[in-house]
Image (tube, rainbow, N blue to C red):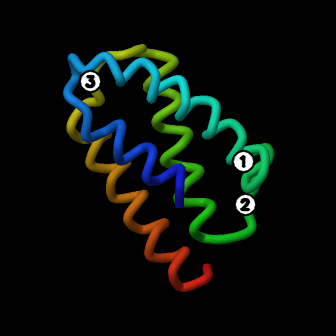
Amino acid sequence: ESLIGEINDYLALDIFDKQRRVTQASIITDSKTWTGKYAPGGSTNTQSAQKMYVVVDSLLGHFAQNGFAPIPSGQLQNIKAGMETATTLLAKGK
């Protein structure tokens, strides 16, 4: 859940906030660590991990393609919805 919090903090930042660069670098590092632990090779054992993997993959793909550009609203909504679903599934132990 700390990765979810970190991503939410990033999404709440203004696009001109200098903290975005630091937070983005931290998310990239933490996402790779999370993926190695919970979804190695994209394979997951739980529904919550699958949802988070989709979020992480989408976010890292955006960072790789667009750098610090704002996330398009449709993609942003999908990321937020995926994190909400993952949080709900985590609470249920799935």
> Element at badge 3?
loop
Label 3: how many Cα within 10 Å (few below 14, some 14–19, many 20+): some
Residue 34 in the image: above or below residue 86 = above
Q: Amino acid at mark 3?
A: Pro
Q: Which mark is residue 42?
A: 1
Earlier-in-chain disc, 3 versus 1: 1
Q: Which residue is mark 2?
A: 44
Position in image of residue 49 (x %, y %): 62, 62
Question: As displayed, is residue 92 above or below residue 87?
Answer: below
- Tell which tag, 3 or 1, sits nearer the viewer: 3
Identified by mark 2, the residue type is Thr
Q: Residue 37 or 62: which is nearer the viewer? A: 37
Asked which secondary structure carries label 2, the reply is loop
Nearer the N terminus, badge 2 or badge 3?
2
Query: Do the residues bearing badges 1 and 2 touch, measured as CB atoms within 8 Å?
Result: yes
Q: Position of residue 52 (x, y in %)?
A: 54, 55
Task: In this rendered view, identify the residue nearer to me: 91 or 18.
Answer: 18
| Image-based side of 54 in relation to 23, left or right | right
Residue at position x 36%, y 47% in the image: 8
Using residue 58 as the reference point, say whether residue 31 is left or right of it: right
Amino acid beneath label 1: Gly
Q: Which element type, helix, strand or loop, lies under badge 1?
A: helix
Residue at (29% x, 41% y) in the render? 76
Select label 2 or label 3 by which is in front.
Answer: 3
Say which residue label 3 marks. Answer: 70
Q: Position of residue 29 (x, y in %)?
A: 64, 31
Is there CB contact under 8 Å for labels 2 and 3? Answer: no
Q: For the residues marked 2 and 3, what is the alpha-carbon distance in whole angstroms?
A: 29 Å
Residue 5 lies, with reference to residue 71, above or below; the image says: below
Gap in Å between the C-alphas at discs 1 and 2? 6 Å
Q: Residues within 10 Å of mark 1 (few under 14, many from 20)?
A: few
User: Horizontally, is 3 left or right of 72 in the view?
Assistant: right
